[in-house]
Image (cartoon, rainbow, N blue to C red):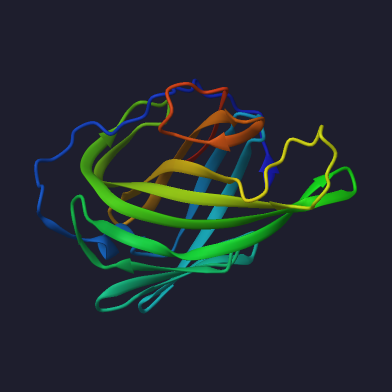
Amino acid sequence: MRKVLVSFTIVTIFWGCGSTSDNGVSIDISNYYPNKNMIKSFYKITDSDDNDLYDEHISIDKNTITVKVDDVIKRTITINSSDIREIDSDDNLTKVIKKVVKLGAIAYTLPKSRVVKDIKVENTILGHESIESIKTCRLEGHIDKLNNYDIKYSGDILKFKCIEDKTIVTKVKENLPDYINLTNGQKKSDYDISYFYMKKNIGLIAKINDDCIVDNKGTKRINDLSAQCKEKKYTHIFFLM
């Protein structure tokens, strides 16, 4: 990947304009993937200014789409008669996406996952966190333009809204010092809302993740439903047309 110093004027509120009035209409999502071999350039920007410009090399063989970055396979997408299966090499997850989806309906749900992480202070393990998460994405809109950023899009575009709900349960060791502010069995949660957009015959054109960070008893968590954010973070990815 190549680091670049490109500055865009960021608008913190993002929505799709030109929504069509086709509620209840079924849409074949397979038409919103690339329909030919192509190279797509993307620009990734974050609140920490860790910005990247990278190319996706897309090749199609019958009903399979392969996406490579720097000659490494990142995603493999297989379009079947009733679903679309997308394998992501970075997290080794397989998305099973409904091929035909009505507006407002769930397109896919990622399997429930569980991760156990140590709670550490320097090199001392105080306990561990058990993190369970489930992510659901639904087809929220059918729009004809996105024009809230310096990079503008128009055409036949689908808008997806994803919600990742995490539950974190702590298990701490006994007889910890009083100054360690940890509660055994304490439940916390992250509620992360993000969006992505796909254009007909092109595929992904934008991914938007704006995070509201809240303070939960001294621990920072994501709660995108909160109106009171301790800080805000974001990761935005744009297709450079």
Task: Determine the residue positioned at 47% across, 21% down.
Answer: 228
Tell me if residue 72 can be seen: yes
Question: Percent x, y for residue 158?
Answer: 27, 48
Q: In the figure, is residue 28 to the left or right of 5? A: left
Q: Quadrant of residue 153?
A: top left
Question: Percent x, y for residue 46?
Answer: 59, 33
Taking depth in this image into account, of 1 and 158 the one nearest to the observer is 158
Task: Determine the residue positioned at 60% across, 52% down.
Answer: 169
How many numbered circles does the render carry?
A: 0
Tell me if residue 239 can be seen: no
Question: Percent x, y for residue 230?
Answer: 57, 22
Quadrant placement of the C terminus: top left
Q: In the figure, is residue 183 to the left or right of 216? A: right
Task: Determine the residue positioned at 25% across, 76% down.
Answer: 82
Question: Percent x, y for residue 115?
Answer: 63, 61
* In the image, farthest residue toward the right: 123
Task: Determine the residue positioned at 59% across, 48% down.
Answer: 54
Looking at the picture, does residue 204 appear above or below residue 222?
A: below
Q: Quadrant of residue 12?
A: top left
* In the image, farthest residue toward the front: 175
